[in-house]
Amino acid sequence: QVQLVESGGGLVQAGGSLRLSCTASGSIFSINTMGWYRQAPGKQREFVASIPSASSSYADSVKGRFTISRNNAKNTVYLQMSSLKPEDTAVYYCNVILSDGSRWLGQGTQVTVSS
């Protein structure tokens, strides 16, 4: 079993910033990819960003505003979110893919951006 603990969500005004964190623990031998998804009310869950190793990828909607990073020693992934918009309001989920191919999703943390 793998446990993912997310933190850093909250309420922020448009144009503000938040930093999300997610730490993985449990039966982990090696983590392949770490990333973030989000789900807004009434919408499907969507990809936000991922960082397999040193490289990273982003959804077009967040490019230039969000930055993903990871600390392998701590099994932690971060999502620095800047210039937040009301449309960024969603529950943000941490996603981890282990080297054995198994996928794990966190419980989610709420991000609310007021206009």
Image: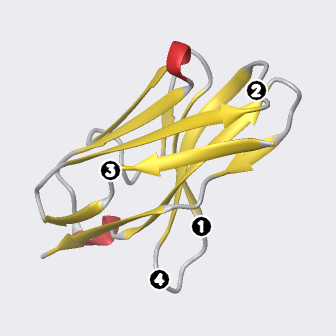
Q: Verify CB contact (< 8 Å) between mark 3 and mark 1.
A: no
Q: CA distance from mark 4 to mark 2?
A: 32 Å
Say which of marks 3 and 4 sits in front: 3
Point out residue 59 in the picture as x, y percentages from the top left corner.
47, 47
Percent from the top left, x then y, of residue 90?
41, 69
Furthest residue toward front? 26
Q: Are marks 1 and 4 in contact (CB under 8 Å)?
A: no
Instruction: Indicate which disc residue 41 carries.
Output: 4
**Left or right: residue 36 compared with residue 14:** right
Secondary structure beneath disc 3?
loop
Res. 54 visible in picture: no
Crowd band around label 1 with a 10 angstrom C-alpha radius: few (<14), some (14–19), many (20+) = some
> Disc 4 or 2, which lies upstream in sequence?
2
Q: Residues within 10 Å of mark 2 (few under 14, many from 20)?
A: some
Q: Nearer the viewer, mark 4 or mark 2?
A: 2
Vertical relation: 71 (above or below) 25: above
In the rendered structure, find residue 45 and report the number of the disc placed on it: 1
Label 2 to label 3, Cα distance in Å?
23 Å
- The numbered mark, 3 or 1, whose residue comes first in the sequence reads 3
Is label 4 in a helix, a strand or a loop? loop
Counting from the top left corner in percent of width and height, residue 23 is at: 53, 36
Q: Residue at x 81, y 23 (%)?
A: 99
Asked if residue 66 lies left or right of residue 69, the reply is: left
Residue under pointer 2? 28
Label 4, residues with CA under 10 Å away: few <14, some 14-19, many ≥20 = few
Residue at the right extreme, as displayed = 100
